[in-house]
Amino acid sequence: MPSDFLEKTLEDIIFNNRDKIHTRGYSEEWYDNTERQFTLPSGKRIDIFSWEIRDNVFYANVIELKKNTAMRDSFWQGMDYVEELAWHTIESFEDLKIKLIIVGNESYSHLSTAGIYGDNVRVYEYTYEWDGILFSPQEYSIEALYKDLQNRRLVDPSIDFFKKQGFAEKLKKSIPPTTTKE
C-alpha cells in the first residue's frame, strides 16, 4: 500500500465508486441518501452514512473506516454511532434497520465479538493492489467467537492465570442455585 494512503483515501475510493464497488467484493446495499462525514447531534462524525425511509422503516448503514487494523475499539466506536442514531430516530419510525459496517486493511481477531450481533454488524478487510482495491467479507458469528476463544485458550498465558485462580468456578459459586417449585 502506498505510504500516502490515508483513511480519507479509503473514504474517497468507497464513496466515489459506490455504484460499482460490489464488483470488488463489497456487497452492502447503498441507500437513496449517502453522505461522508455525517455529523450526529452529539457532534460525532460517521465516516460514510447511507440511509433511506421505506414504509415508515428507517434503513441505515453506518460505515466505519480504518486505514489499518480494525480493532475492538472500532466496533465500539461504530456501536456508539448506531446507538445515537437509534436514540434519535426510534420514536419516529415503525422499525429501525441499522447496520454497522467496519472496513480495515485487516481485522483483529477479537472483533469476533461482532458475531453476537448477527447480520447487523459486518466486517470487511481490504487490500489495495496495482489494479485497485479489493474487499473480503469476514465471517464473525457466535461459532467463530467460540472457536476464537478456544484457540486463544491454547496460546494465551492469561487464560492459564485465570484458570489457576479458579475464575470460572468463583463465578459459578457467586450465582445462587435455582430452585424449582413443585
Image (spheres, helix red, strand yellow):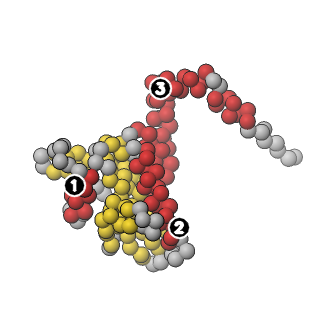
| Neighbourhood count class around disc 3 (C-alpha, 10 Å): few under 14, some 14–19, many 20 upward | few
Q: Residues within 10 Å of mark 2 (few under 14, many from 20)?
A: few
Coordinates of residue 80 in the picture (x, y in percent)? 47, 57
Res. 97 in view: no
Q: Which residue is mark 2?
A: 87
Q: Quadrant of residue 48?
A: bottom left
Mark seen at residue 156: 3
| x and y percentages locating residue 162 in the rendered image | 58, 26
Residue 8 in view in this figure = yes
Q: Badge 1, how many Cα within 10 Å: few under 14, some, many 20+?
A: few
Instruction: Please state which of residues 174 and 77 is positioned toward the viewer in this rendering.
Output: 77
Instruction: Quarter of the image for the N terminus: give it.
Output: top left
Q: Which residue is mark 1?
A: 9
Q: Which residue is pictured at 47% across the width and 55% down the height?
A: 79
In percent of width and height, residue 123 lies at 37, 50
Q: What amino acid type is highlighted by mark number 2?
A: Trp
Label whose residue precedes the other's in the sequence (3 or 1): 1
Q: Secondary structure at mark 2?
A: helix
Task: Please state if 123 lies on the left or on the right of 85 as rendered.
Answer: left
Q: Are marks 3 and 1 in contact (CB under 8 Å)?
A: no
How far apart in space, not on screen, are marks 3 and 1 (Cα)? 36 Å
Which callout, 1 or 2, points at the residue further toward the start of the chain?
Answer: 1
